[in-house]
């Protein structure tokens, strides 16, 4: 070190000292600060070298070692902030030697994020300044030892004040984190309800499509029956009138009118029409019953359910999707015990995964649904021969809002909600997929009590 510049408070910095952040700072000094920034609601907090490579970092799941290229380009151009992130340049000897980088999550309040960033930057500068002064103290001449000691006392006083503020800040940040966590839970509950409503909308469309066919021929048959009754009424009026007049031409005229009105055909076809209407009404009754079984509107607690029957109901509800895509569903239902859980939620899981499978390919789609008991678990496998899922995104399938569909085609919540429901039943979902060969979702549900008599379909 060549020379030093002093202020009224003592040594401020050295002329000619070439020092990097690695020389000035250490992990024990910066790790607590970065961890506190994360607790305060930031997604990522890091200290970088001048080129943007991370020297120290704390995050909530990001696995990165340097600033993204777009942010590094902004950094070179002198742009150090936007609504989602903030770069604070760190100086030594009036030269930039690195940056403090803080990434804001989408849900975080901007003013709170700005306040936390400024306080973290101020604290880090104070740590850097104190560190430099400590190093200067160790290299100073013995004549300045007493002066350096007094400076250290002042530094310790400032550090004590800073530590007190830091503790207060930590308490405030922890409280904010708890509040944000509670808000996220409420948001997740709302999203679950929205996904249910979206499923109900799809169900309504499917049921309307299924009911439309029997309703159509019932309507047509009733119109035909109405015409038949008009002809029969006309014939009966003729018989009544002719019997009163006792005309000699009665037999000839009645036979001519009988044939003209096709009374024989009406008699025979009326029975067929009535039978068709009965079958149509039975079909409507079956569709509504399946819908009621699927929705489980009256189920408010855990009950014993037949998993095979829940799958059967869900497949029936999705029959309009199956028919529109000419898809085939193979059911290999095993001999399994009853399961204790929430039928409505479990049906939601089957609905979301089956709908995903039905949308995996437009032509030649085949889906195999298999159930079996393995040890103390029920295994439900839903496999398709669709286009498959790329390996680099398979790990993200159950993330909220993640979707590979076009904008407006999906919310990205179907599989996430299915995953949460299965985890809520102490189970798990696994997925395996190969491009061009299809995907297989395996649901494992633990048996939590002595099983009821086995069921088989």
Image (spheres, rainbow, N blue to C red):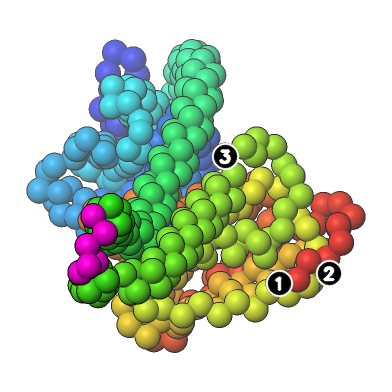
Q: Mark 3 points at which residue?
A: 297
Per the image, label 3 sits on a secondary structure element best described as: loop
Please state if 137 lies on the left or on the right of 221 as rendered: right
Q: What element carries label 1?
A: loop
Q: Nearer the viewer, residue 373 or 102?
A: 373
Tell me what residue is drawn at x 67 percent, y 65 percent: 308
Mark 3 or 2, nearer chain start: 3
Residue placed at 34% from the left, 22% from the top? 112
Q: Earlier in the sequence, mark 3 or mark 1?
A: 3
Residue 286 in magenta stretch: no
Q: Where is residue 171 in the image (x, y as percent from the top left)?
A: 54, 19
Horizontal and vertical percent for residue 145? 49, 24
For discs 2 and 1, the disc positioned in front in the rendered view: 1
| Disc 2 packing (10 Å; few <14; some 14–19; many ≥20) | few
* Quadrant in the rendering for residue 28: top right
Depth order, front residue of 328/5: 328
Is any atom of residue 24 visible in this view?
Answer: no
- Residue at image mark 1: 457
Q: Residue 351: x, y in percent?
A: 50, 58
Furthest-left residue in view? 77
Label 2, on which residue?
375
Q: Give the range drawn in magenta.
A: 245-250
Label the magenta part by its dominant secondary structure: loop
């Amino acid at each position: 070190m060549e020379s030093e510049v002093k202020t009224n408070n003592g040594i401020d910095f050295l002329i000619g000292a070439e020092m990097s952040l690695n020389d000035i700072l250490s992990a024990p000094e910066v790790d607590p600060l970065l961890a506190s920034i994360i607790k305060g609601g930031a997604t990522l907090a890091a200290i970088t070298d001048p080129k943007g490579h991370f020297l120290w970092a704390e995050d909530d799941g990001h696995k990165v070692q340097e600033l993204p290229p777009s942010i590094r380009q902004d950094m070179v151009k002198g742009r150090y902030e936007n609504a989602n992130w903030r770069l604070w340049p760190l100086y030594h000897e009036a030269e930039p030697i690195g940056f403090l980088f803080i990434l804001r999550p989408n849900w975080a309040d901007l003013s709170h994020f700005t306040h936390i960033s400024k306080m973290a930057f101020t604290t880090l500068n104070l740590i850097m300044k104190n560190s430099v002064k400590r190093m200067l103290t160790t290299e100073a001449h013995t004549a300045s030892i007493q002066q350096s000691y007094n400076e250290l006392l002042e530094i310790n006083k400032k550090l004590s004040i800073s530590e007190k503020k830091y503790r207060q800040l930590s308490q405030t940040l922890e409280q904010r984190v708890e509040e944000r966590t509670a808000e996220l839970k409420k948001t997740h509950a709302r999203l679950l309800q929205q996904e249910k409503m979206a499923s109900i909308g799809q169900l309504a469309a499917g049921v309307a499509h299924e009911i439309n066919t029997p309703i159509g021929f019932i309507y047509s048959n009733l119109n035909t029956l109405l015409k038949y009754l008009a002809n029969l009424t006309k014939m009966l009026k003729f018989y009544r009138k002719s019997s009163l007049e006792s005309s000699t031409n009665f037999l000839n005229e009645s036979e001519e009118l009988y044939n003209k009105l096709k009374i024989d055909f009406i008699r025979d076809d009326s029975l067929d029409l009535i039978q068709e209407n009965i079958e149509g009404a039975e079909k409507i009754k079956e569709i509504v019953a399946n819908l009621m079984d699927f929705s489980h509107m009256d189920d408010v607690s855990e009950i014993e359910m037949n998993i095979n029957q829940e799958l059967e109901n869900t497949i029936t509800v999705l029959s309009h999707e199956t028919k529109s895509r000419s898809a085939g569903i193979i059911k290999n239902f095993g001999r399994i015990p009853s399961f204790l859980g929430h039928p409505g939620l479990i049906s939601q899981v089957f609905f979301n995964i089956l709908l995903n499978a039905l949308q995996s390919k437009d032509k030649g789609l085949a889906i195999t649904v298999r159930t079996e008991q393995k040890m103390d678990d029920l295994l439900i496998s839903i496999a398709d021969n669709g286009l498959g899922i790329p390996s680099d995104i398979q790990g993200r399938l159950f993330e909220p809002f993640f979707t590979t569909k076009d904008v407006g085609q999906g919310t990205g919540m179907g599989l996430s909600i299915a995953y949460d429901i299965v985890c809520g039943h102490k189970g798990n979902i696994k997925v395996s997929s190969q491009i061009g060969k299809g995907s297989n979702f395996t649901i494992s549900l633990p048996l939590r009590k002595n099983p009821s008599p086995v069921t088989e379909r």
